[in-house]
């Protein structure tokens, strides 16, 4: 009896610790981006240093591109990100972290999309704080940004949408259906190489243990293009360049993309309706471009 009582006390104590940890995670205020550093360095040279630092920290570089002048976006992944991506049905959207190098006036900003924010917004059911800490150790950490204080809580991001009748995470677009996973991959690779929909491939990451692959896709032109949209919405002094590029997700024989009204809004949570109306044509145009890349009709 005494042993059973002790076992009950230990179990209750451990449960309280677990609940406290969950409550602490839910109470944590999150921001979409981390400003790692500001220097006076050249954009390309700074990007190369960032790439070297990421590799030294154990990240795998999977692609990079310059969406417009004085910017470089670096895409990277690691084992923790791939494992997290594999653990949920559409976790592949979050298999890659995006690091941006942006020239603003006389300064060069190095920033990255916050993995903690991504894990919650993309419902990955994974703790990516270790990935964030790895990025901070490799690149630096000045401050979080991208939303007004005090930020957002995890449960708010799990159910994020811009406003009533706007899409949630799971309201993504099914862009194309193919006969098999292999056929879908061939179609996407071929269409991106051909520049269908004014698109270009930035990266490809295959999710381990699943028939799932995420592509990073650059989009050109107007009204869907990366440069066109960012000139309108990225107005703050510290730039949110790590919003780019968009994801295209192959899962089995199907090809999906997050709805642009969700994808843009969750990366720019302070976007006001007036600014959103200035890119009113962009979500449908983005879907059309990605649909052509996906091989949809």
Image: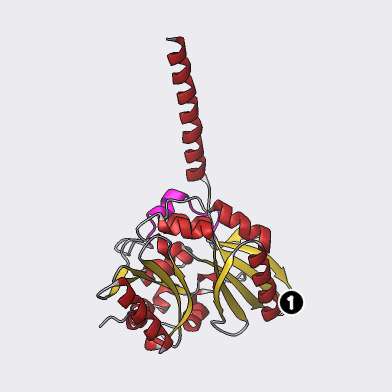
The residue that appears at 69% across and 66% down in the rendered structure is 37
The image quadrant where one finds the N terminus is top left
Q: Is mark 1 on a helix, strand or loop?
A: loop
Q: Position of residue 130 (x, y in %)?
A: 57, 52
Mark 1 crowdedness (10 Å alpha carbons): few <14, some 14-19, many ≥20: some
Colour mode?
Answer: secondary structure
Residue 175: where, in percent of width, then height?
A: 29, 75
Extreme right residue here?
40
Q: Residue at x 65, y 61 (%)?
A: 57
Q: Is residue 158 located in the magenta-colored stretch of the structure?
A: yes
Magenta stretch encompasses residue 266: no
For image coordinates 63% across by 76% down, the residue present is: 102
- Res 285 seen here: no
Tell me the residue at 39%/75% (across/down).
Answer: 277
Our reading of the magenta stretch's main secondary structure is loop
Q: Up-down: is 203 above or below 152?
A: below
Q: 230 or 60, which is in the foreground?
A: 60
Q: How many numbered discs?
A: 1
Q: Find residue 113 and report its image quarter.
A: bottom right
The magenta segment is: 147-161
- The residue that label 1 is drawn on is 41
Res. 57 in view: yes
Choose between 273 and 267: the one closer to the eye: 267
Q: Foreground: 14 or 269?
A: 14
Q: Locate the C terminus and report the quarter of the image it occupies.
A: bottom left
Q: Where is residue 144 in the image (x, y as percent from the top left)?
A: 60, 59
Q: Quadrant location of residue 185?
A: bottom left
């Amino acid at each position: 009896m005494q042993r059973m009582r002790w076992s009950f006390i230990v179990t209750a104590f451990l449960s309280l610790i677990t609940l406290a940890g969950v409550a602490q995670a839910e109470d944590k205020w999150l921001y979409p981006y981390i400003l790692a550093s500001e220097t006076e360095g050249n954009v390309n040279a700074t990007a190369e240093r960032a790439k070297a630092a990421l590799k030294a920290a154990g990240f795998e570089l999977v692609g990079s591109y310059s969406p417009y002048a004085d910017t470089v976006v670096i895409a990277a992944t690691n084992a923790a990100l791939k494992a997290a991506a594999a653990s949920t049905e559409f976790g592949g959207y979050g298999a890659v972290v995006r690091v941006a190098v942006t020239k603003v006036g006389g300064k060069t900003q190095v920033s990255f999309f916050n993995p903690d924010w991504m894990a919650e917004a993309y419902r990955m059911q994974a703790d990516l704080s270790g990935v964030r800490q790895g990025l901070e150790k490799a690149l630096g950490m000045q401050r979080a940004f991208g939303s007004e204080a005090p930020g957002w809580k995890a449960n708010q991001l799990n159910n994020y949408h811009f406003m009533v009748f706007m899409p949630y995470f799971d309201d993504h677009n099914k862009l194309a259906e193919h006969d098999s996973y292999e056929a879908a991959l061939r179609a996407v690779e071929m269409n991106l190489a051909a520049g269908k929909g004014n698109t270009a491939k930035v990266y490809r990451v295959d999710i381990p243990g699943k028939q799932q692959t995420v592509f990073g896709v650059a989009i050109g032109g107007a009204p869907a293009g990366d440069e066109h949209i960012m000139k309108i919405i990225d107005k703050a002094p510290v730039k949110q360049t790590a919003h780019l590029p968009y994801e295209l997700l192959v899962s089995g024989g199907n090809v999906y993309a997050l709805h642009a009204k969700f994808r843009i809004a969750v990366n720019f949570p302070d976007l006001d309706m007036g600014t959103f109306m200035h890119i009113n044509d962009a979500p449908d145009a983005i879907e059309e471009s990605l649909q052509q890349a996906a091989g949809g009709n």
